[in-house]
Image (cartoon, coloured by chain):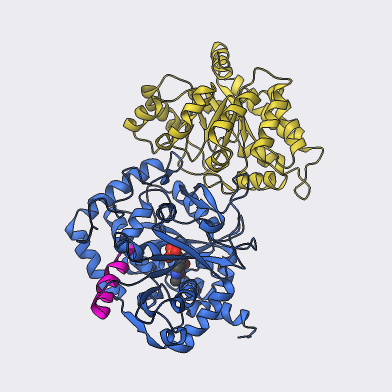
Chain colours: A blue, B yellow
């Protein structure tokens, strides 16, 4: 999905044919899955080259997802911070309440082309699961969602939404019962049901072609934002901020700007209780390169190469890895990876709600939290775009509990 | 000659297939798994697969997942697993040992250092579940330099053309994952195995063993008759785990596992 502003020697050209972004990415999967990865790669290449696929996708994005999403100049928040002007890319206004639907719609249209009748997916916060269950309902596909038992507990409203939509939600109790374990279980299901089943990865992770494909489907965020910010301010922004779980909303808004090297990009990892608390989800800040879930990337791991548990208040960021393209963008210095703690995210959650009347997802609140740090260091004539990846209704019980309120 | 080659030559001369039992290192503790490992050849193990516990065994079913968790809890590390193999080698110089695991612990250890130390400890081959031939370039030179075998996996989903390509680089033996699924679940039928062997034989002439879903002596006999060997993992672990008391080994644990191995090996010898 090349857009006109791509340049030669572009940072947007990756990955290579075997799915590597520099030393990261690749296809580290069992032989049973390898032929499927090659088949998926072919199917995606074909779809990508077919104008009918793009037309179909554009139709569903407009009339079902509700795109384009607005870019909102958050004046009251900007004034309160006393620095750069904050523009919110309103992905929370998409159908189902997050950016996740952009990717799900693209992949299910592809799965339908491939003749698949059964969809499996992993979910953390439940947003990807809800988006998947939604599109499966729309197209009458069987839907099985794997979700860590701990996440089932802390994201109850989303679990019930998935049930209503006709999906089967399978709690995963192995490991710590969070997103990485759900990912393992979804891969196990897939390997056992390869003929009928399409594995719908929810972020820019997994084996090639998932990181590139999910990025392409999410790049609609950045493509729109690039036009919108220029319409509203007459120029490109002075910074873009997005929260990072696996990194799909961030990759989606960053990618169309990668070659605009004067636009600083900030990926906000979940700091959890603090980067040095041992209770964090900041894979780049506190991890090291390794191989998990089909790709080489930065991972939280111990000195023996065992994956350690992530911690974040936000279920959607509670993942010990990050998409491989981010690892590469970190190492070449194109994107700045920073972090926000649970506490900072909670503060940002409340401030955005009070000042703009927008309740953000706890995931997105991490991006807002970093904007609260960065904006005051910049002049009032500067502009920052913040990706508001989702709405916070699902997090109201969690936030209430942290604020000591009994619902 | 490598231990693996010598082993298959000898077994072929006897006109039978190999029995390849699996144990998860450090399950449920280092001592128990060392005792089991040391006693396996006498119970009829021709080759032994030693599972290296990993936190995220995405190709394994519940039985091996739990074994890996117990192993990690008991302090399993790659160094510890190599020490187990070295100890085994003090009393056994002929039974091949193949480590089976996932790539990240090896990657983290350093592929070169790992291959050197594995060879020095008496390891003969490696099965790295999530390292397909496309990504194996990083380890291959060190495998060769240390005279190890990197065992190639083939699956029912592997098309003929791909079989030819990946088996061109195979050494030691080929591990045929006989079902599309995770360990310890379904079992391939005799017909499926026979057809698969026809495909595999067209692509390679090194020994082929079948694994995944082989549980009973009957199934082991069938698989080792059609192919050159049968790998049995979950069934042995399950039998042993049934003897644990609150996750801890009991007097009955090692004998129970050995009894299971013995019954499997008698079946494979009796074809
Ligand atoms: C609203 C929202 N934002 C962000 C994320 C994190 O995922 P990613 O980093 O792939 O955008 C999630 C994941 O569940 C989410 O629900």
Tell which of B229 and A268 is nearer to you. Answer: A268
A363 drawn magenta: no
Which of the image's four quarters has the N terminus of chain B? top right
A220 drawn magenta: yes
Corner quadrant of residue A258? bottom left
Where in the figure is residue A147, as x and y percent of width and height? 52, 62
Residue projecting furthest to the right: B251
The residue under the point 53% across, 21% down is: B147
The residue under the point 23% across, 50% down is: A46
Q: Is residue A139 left or right of residue B77?
A: left
Which of the image's four quarters has the C terminus of chain B? top right
Corner quadrant of residue B4? top right
Residue stretch in magenta: A218-235
Q: Ligand 1 is located in which of the four quadrants?
A: bottom left
Where in the figure is residue B135, as x and y percent of width and height? 42, 37
Q: Is residue A267 above or below residue B65?
A: below
Q: Is residue B107 left or right of residue A199?
A: right
The residue under the point 49% across, 64% down is: A338
For the image, the number of numbered tags is: 0
Where in the figure is residue B24, as x and y percent of width and height? 65, 38
């Amino acid at each position: 999905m090349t857009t006109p502003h791509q340049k030669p020697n572009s940072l947007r050209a990756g990955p290579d044919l075997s799915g590597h972004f520099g030393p990261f990415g690749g296809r580290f999967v069992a032989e049973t899955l390898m032929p499927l990865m090659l088949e998926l790669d072919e199917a995606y290449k074909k779809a990508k080259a077919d104008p009918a696929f793009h037309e179909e996708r554009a139709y569903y994005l407009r009339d079902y997802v509700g795109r384009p999403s607005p870019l909102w100049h958050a004046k009251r928040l900007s004034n309160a911070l006393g620095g750069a002007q904050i523009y919110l890319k309103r992905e929370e206004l998409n159908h189902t309440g997050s950016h996740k639907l952009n990717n799900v719609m693209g992949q299910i249209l592809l799965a339908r082309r491939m003749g698949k009748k059964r969809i499996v997916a992993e979910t953390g916060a439940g947003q990807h699961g809800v988006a998947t269950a939604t599109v499966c309902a729309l197209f009458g596909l069987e839907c099985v969602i794997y979700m860590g038992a701990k996440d089932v507990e802390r994201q109850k409203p989303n679990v019930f939404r998935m049930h209503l939509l006709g999906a089967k939600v399978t709690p995963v109790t192995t490991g710590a019962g969070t997103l990485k374990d759900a990912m393992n279980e979804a891969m196990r299901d897939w390997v056992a049901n390869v003929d009928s089943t399409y594995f719908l990865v929810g972020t820019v992770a997994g084996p090639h072609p998932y990181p590139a494909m999910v990025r392409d489907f999410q790049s609609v965020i950045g493509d729109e934002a690039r036009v919108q910010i220029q319409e509203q301010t007459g120029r490109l922004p002075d910074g873009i901020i997005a929260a990072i779980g696996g990194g799909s909303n961030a990759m989606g808004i960053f990618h169309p700007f990668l070659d605009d090297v004067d636009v600083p990009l900030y990926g906000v990892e979940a700091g959890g209780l603090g980067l040095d608390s041992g209770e964090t989800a900041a894979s780049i800040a506190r991890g090291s390169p390794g191989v998990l879930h089909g790709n080489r990337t930065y991972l939280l791991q111990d000195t023996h190469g065992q994956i350690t548990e992530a911690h974040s208040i936000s279920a959607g960021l509670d993942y010990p890895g990050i998409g491989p393209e981010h690892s590469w963008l970190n190492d070449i210095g194109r994107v700045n990876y920073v972090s926000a703690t649970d506490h900072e995210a909670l503060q940002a959650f409340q401030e955005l709600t009070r000042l703009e009347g927008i309740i953000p997802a706890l995931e997105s609140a991490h991006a807002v939290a970093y904007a609260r740090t960065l904006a005051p260091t910049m002049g009032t004539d500067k502009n920052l775009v913040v990706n508001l990846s989702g709405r916070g209704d699902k997090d109201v019980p969690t936030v209430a509990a942290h604020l000591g309120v009994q619902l | 000659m490598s231990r693996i080659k010598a082993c298959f030559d000898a077994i072929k001369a006897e006109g039978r297939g190999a029995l390849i039992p699996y144990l998860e290192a450090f399950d449920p503790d280092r001592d128990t798994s060392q005792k089991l490992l040391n006693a396996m050849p006498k119970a009829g193990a021709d080759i032994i697969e030693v599972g290296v516990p990993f936190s995220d065994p995405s190709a394994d079913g519940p039985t091996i997942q739990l074994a890996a968790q117990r192993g990690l809890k008991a302090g399993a590390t790659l160094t510890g697993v190599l020490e187990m193999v070295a100890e085994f080698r003090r009393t056994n110089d002929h039974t091949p040992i193949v480590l089976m695991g996932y790539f990240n612990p090896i990657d983290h250890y350093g592929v070169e250092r790992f291959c050197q130390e594995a060879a020095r400890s008496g390891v003969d081959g490696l099965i790295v579940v999530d390292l397909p031939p496309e990504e194996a370039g990083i380890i291959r030179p060190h495998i060769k330099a240390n005279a190890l075998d990197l065992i190639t996996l083939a699956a029912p989903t592997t098309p003929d053309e791909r079989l030819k390509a990946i088996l061109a680089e195979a050494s030691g033996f080929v591990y045929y994952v006989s079902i599309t699924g995770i360990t310890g679940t379904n079992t391939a039928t005799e017909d499926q195995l026979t057809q698969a062997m026809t495909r595999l034989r067209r692509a390679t002439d090194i020994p082929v063993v079948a694994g995944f879903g082989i549980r009973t002596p009957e199934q082991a006999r069938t698989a080792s008759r059609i192919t050159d060997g049968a790998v049995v993992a979950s069934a042995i672990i399950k039998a042993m785990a049934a003897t644990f008391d609150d996750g801890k080994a009991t007097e009955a644990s090692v004998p129970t596992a050995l009894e299971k191995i013995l019954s499997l090996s008698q079946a494979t010898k009796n074809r």
